[in-house]
Image (spheres, coloured by chain):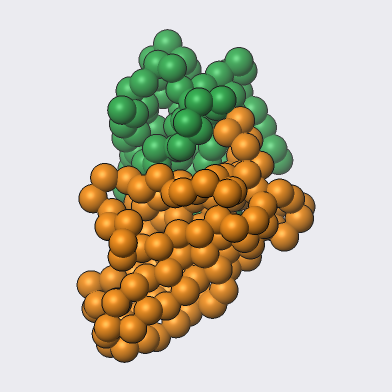
Chain colours: A orange, B green
Amino acid sequence: GAVVSQHPSWVICKSGTSVKIECRSLDFQATTMFWYRQFPKQSLMLMATSNEGSKATYEQGVEKDKFLINHASLTLSTLTVTSAHPEDSSFYICSASAGVAYEQYFGPGTRLTVT
Amino acid sequence: GENVEQHPSTLSVQEGDSAVIKCTYSDSASNYFPWYKQELGKGPQLIIDIRSNVGEKKDQRIAVTLNKTAKHFSLHITETQPEDSAVYFCAASLSGGSYIPTFGRGTSLIVHP
């Protein structure tokens, strides 16, 4: 149980285009989903927290107009990187939780490369 | 806010040896401490966790200890195997509150066959 999937696992896009990453909880209802960014050999950096049906809460320094997060259902959250630039290249990881008192389960991550 | 320190950053052991990774936290209100294993190119996987109402938890070759007074917790892996090689992250959070964990910087564990 507690499986979280992400799609795509890797994506290459041209500078200036937008790319959408999906995060799905496969066997439980995720009231809360989190989006992280991870640079090589570094820890996870929380970008935003989203609750189903509500607007996402972004961490300080994260541009909400650039990283659009939608948590439309209890099993799906999406992260859209708008007008991507090479500096947005990174490993993006989502996690899902059944609620504030429950564990987080992470997806396998999405490697984004912007050329 | 919470601050989590993790040591060592790199740990190299021989197969069969034990490995210990230590973390300290700053917020005495934190009461949930998960450990994650991240293999190269993959997302973190929860391997064990402990809540503040217990001092130790064990799952086969993996154990976690918690000292709330000193605000530190440790991951112990016995009889290490090459497949244990990965990056391990500790985290601390307040269950029931915002529940957003603060992660340590990670420990790269290398198990030599």
Q: Which of the pair B15/A87 is nearer the observer?
A: A87
Rendering coords of residue B58 (x, y %): 66, 32
Please state the total of marks drawn on the protein image. Answer: 0
Q: Identify the residue at horizontal 45%, vertical 37% (top origin).
A: B101
Q: Identify the residue at horizontal 48%, vertical 43% (top origin).
A: B19
Q: Which of the pair A20/A25 is nearer the observer?
A: A20
Q: Residue furthest top?
A: B69
Q: Identify the residue at horizontal 48%, vertical 79% (top origin).
A: A10
Above or below — where is B100 with respect to B11? above
Q: Which of the pair B30/A8 is nearer the observer?
A: A8
Above or below — where is B4 with respect to A98? above
Residue B86 located left or right of residue A18: right
Q: Which of the pair A71/B96 is nearer the observer?
A: A71
Above or below — where is B7 with respect to B28? below
Q: Identify the residue at horizontal 59%, vertical 48% (top origin).
A: A52
Rendering coords of residue B55 (x, y %): 58, 18
Rendering coords of residue B71 (x, y %): 40, 19
* Residue B10 appearing in the image: no
* Residue A61 appearing in the image: yes
Displayed quadrant of residue B30: top left
Residue B48 located left or right of residue B86: right
Rendering coords of residue B9 (x, y %): 32, 48
Image quadrant holding the N terminus of chain B, namely top left
